């Protein structure tokens, strides 16, 4: 099959519904020639159902990124699907979670904050290290962020967790660069996804995009962000690492 990911094998986390960026990234990646493996947490039967809606059904591996035992066994589970000695060419990290308390900046407990940071930021490094034995030079790791340059209304400690993710990306790019592995993030605007439903005041946050995206923004269309992920997974950015590519309709450049 032809395409910019022809012959590549990609692991995609975070697929839960067809409205997720992870699903669109997996779909576009398959259309561009990649072989896809998915991971799921909690509702595996739901992820397996959604996986069947991809252009080609994809296997699903259970993964809780806060469970070190599962991380330690992840490479072996991926090998079961790829075959012994077959490399993994890319990872999509589309994992974020904050307890409800994390969305109240002044009242949040350390338990709330530490959970948000562990799952949303530290797991980026954890996932990379778990799969590093399978990744050759030329591989690419791509994560999803929500622009952490400013303090968004209602986002609170999740915004701090995203800032930690963006910093983690730079340090990971520094340390994996000598191995020939690129690490980049896609910063998307708000989308009406399953994750959005857990954010109090999401509509107020999203309304910024209705007024300030110079090229426009569709809250119900995750495909542009998915395409951005696939572009960074491809070989078209061979010396781009430690970067954040904004796929947000241009809101990030508009200032206060």
Image: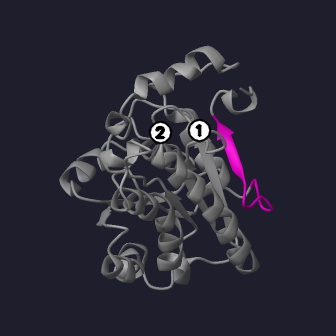
Residue highlighted by disc 2: 155
Residues at badges 2 and 1 in contact (C-beta under 8 Å)? yes
Quarter of the figure with the C terminus: top right
Left or right of residue 133, residue 233 in this image: right
In the rendered structure, which segment of residues is drawn in magenta? 236-247
Report the predominant secondary structure element of the magenta stretch.
Answer: loop
Q: How far from the left and from the top, in percent, is residue 161? A: 51, 54
Taking the view exactly as shown, the residue that stands out farthest to the top is 211
Q: Is residue 185 above or below residue 173?
A: above
Left or right of residue 54, residue 256 in this image: right
Q: Residue at x 56, y 16 (%)?
A: 210
- Residue 115 appearing in the image: yes
Q: What is the crowding at mark 2: few (fewer than 14 residues within 10 Å), some, or many (at least 20)?
A: many
- State the count of labels: 2
Q: Residue at x 69, y 49 (%)?
A: 244
Q: How far from the left and from the top, in percent, is residue 82? A: 43, 74
Residue highlighted by disc 1: 151
Q: Nearer the viewer, residue 18 or 94?
A: 94
């Amino acid at each position: 099959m032809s395409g910019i990911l022809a012959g590549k094998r990609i692991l995609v986390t975070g697929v839960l519904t067809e409205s997720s960026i992870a699903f669109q990234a997996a779909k576009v990646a398959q259309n561009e020639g990649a072989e896809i493996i998915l991971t799921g947490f909690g509702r595996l039967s739901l992820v397996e159902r959604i996986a069947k809606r991809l252009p080609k059904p994809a296997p699903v591996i259970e993964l809780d990124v806060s469970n070190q035992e599962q991380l330690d066994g992840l490479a072996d589970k991926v090998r079961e699907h790829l075959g012994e000695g077959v490399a993994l060419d890319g990872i999509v990290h589309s994992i974020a979670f904050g307890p409800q308390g994390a969305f109240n900046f002044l009242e949040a407990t350390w338990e709330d904050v530490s959970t948000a940071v562990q799952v949303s930021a530290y797991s980026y490094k954890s996932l990379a290290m778990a799969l590093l034995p399978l990744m050759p030079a030329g591989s690419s790791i791509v994560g999803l962020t929500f622009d952490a340059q400013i303090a968004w209304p209602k986002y609170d400690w999740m915004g701090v967790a995203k800032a930690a993710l963006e910093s983690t990306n730079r340090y990971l790019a520094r340390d994996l660069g000598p191995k020939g592995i690129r690490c980049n993030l896609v910063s998307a605007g708000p989308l009406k996804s399953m994750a959005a439903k857990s954010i109090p005041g999401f509509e107020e946050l999203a309304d910024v995009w209705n007024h300030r995206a110079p090229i426009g923004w569709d809250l119900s269309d995750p495909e542009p962000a998915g395409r951005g992920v696939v572009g960074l997974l491809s070989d078209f950015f061979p010396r781009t690492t430690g970067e954040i590519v904004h796929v947000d309709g241009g809101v990030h450049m508009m200032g206060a």
